[in-house]
Image (cartoon, helix red, strand yellow):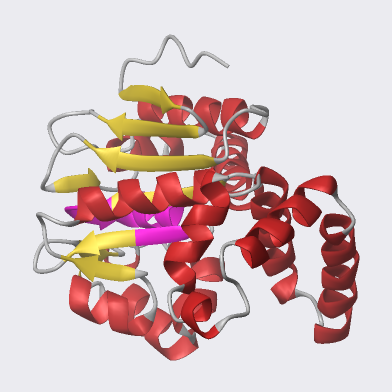
């Protein structure tokens, strides 16, 4: 699929990896126009069978996504409530698509992220930040509203109820080290390491069998179900993969390369990459 006619997103494909770079100066505020492009991209990605990993990053090293356009919210508030219901539902739908599409979604957050930008990031599968530079802020309650882009539901699931209340009601900056410790970020990395780390992870995931990647994400998504239901669903997905030609081939290759030997198991991370390489 060709990703065309975007003005605020620069989109590049590298095999099964698609990377979108936000470039909406001066600070990457989520204007109605940028929201429209992000929403359209989520629809196109969800329908793209050739993409396995999606990375979102920013051209501005100081701002990932500032927040939703407050001026636009004021305009909406001056009009009929139905307009807000439509916008809110569309934002929820966009976040839901990123969260549940059969692609691995990664947010590479090198600067500030706030409000709706943080909520969008929370809908991604993984988030990586920069030590001493990535800052998260939920500024909605101080301006008289609440995080309405799925944040009040996603943040407690990420970091727990008490910490979510602290972040959202306090309106204070959350630094990268704390965000990593609390689970908001997967990792906080040095500024000169994040790009290489995310790129290497994306390539590694994209090298593995696509069906296994997609169904593993789907199974992890079932963790919100009652445990018994999630385990039953896991069993079905496991069997679907186990009886595939791809799995049989990869398992045989694993053993050929030294799996289940002392030497092989002591280097299993590298061995996994060799299996993927064929």
- Identified at 22% across, 48% down, the residue is 195
Furthest-bottom residue in this view? 162
Q: Is residue 40 left or right of residue 75?
A: right
Picture coordinates of residue 47, whole percent (x, y): 68, 28
Task: Examine the rendering and report whether any part of residue 110 can be seen.
Answer: yes
Residue 134: image quadrant is: bottom left
Magenta highlight range: 109-127
Residue furthest top in the image: 5
Query: Horizontal and vertical percent for residue 27?
Result: 16, 38
Q: Residue at x 40, y 42 (%)?
A: 55
Q: Along the line of sight, which residue is nearer the eye, 99 or 141?
A: 99
**14 relative to 56, above or below:** above
Residue 237: quarter of image: bottom right
Residue in the picture at 29% in, 75% down: 179
Q: Is residue 109 left or right of residue 150?
A: left
Residue 69 x %, y %: 31, 39
Q: Is residue 246 magenta?
A: no
**Residue 149 visible (yes or no):** no
Residue that appears at 55% across and 50% down: 276
Q: Quadrant of the N terminus?
A: top right
């Amino acid at each position: 699929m060709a990703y065309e006619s975007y003005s605020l997103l620069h989109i590049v494909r590298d095999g099964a990896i698609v990377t979108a770079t936000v470039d909406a100066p001066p600070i990457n505020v989520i204007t109605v126009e940028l929201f429209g492009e992000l929403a359209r991209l989520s629809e196109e990605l969800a329908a793209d069978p050739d993409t396995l990993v999606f990375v979102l990053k920013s051209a501005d090293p100081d701002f990932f996504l500032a927040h939703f356009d407050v001026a636009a919210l004021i305009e909406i508030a001056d009009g009929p409530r139905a307009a807000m219901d439509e916008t809110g539902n569309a934002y929820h739908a966009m976040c839901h698509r990123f969260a549940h599409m059969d692609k691995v979604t990664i947010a590479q957050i090198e600067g500030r992220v706030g409000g709706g930008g943080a909520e969008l990031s929370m809908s991604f599968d993984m988030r990586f930040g920069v030590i001493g530079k990535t800052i998260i802020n939920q500024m909605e309650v101080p301006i008289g509203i609440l995080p309405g882009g799925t944040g009040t539901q996603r943040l407690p699931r990420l970091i727990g109820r008490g910490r979510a209340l602290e972040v959202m009601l306090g309106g204070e900056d959350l630094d990268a080290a704390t965000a990593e410790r609390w689970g908001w970020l997967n990792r906080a990395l040095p500024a000169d390491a994040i790009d290489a780390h995310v790129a290497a992870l994306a390539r590694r995931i994209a090298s593995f069998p696509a069906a296994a990647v997609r169904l593993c994400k789907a199974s992890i998504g079932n963790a919100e179900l009652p445990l018994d239901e999630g385990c039953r669903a896991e069993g079905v997905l496991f069997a679907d993969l186990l009886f595939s030609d791809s799995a049989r081939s990869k398992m045989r290759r694993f053993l050929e390369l030294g799996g289940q030997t002392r030497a092989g198991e002591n280097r299993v991370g590298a061995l996994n990459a060799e299996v993927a390489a064929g």
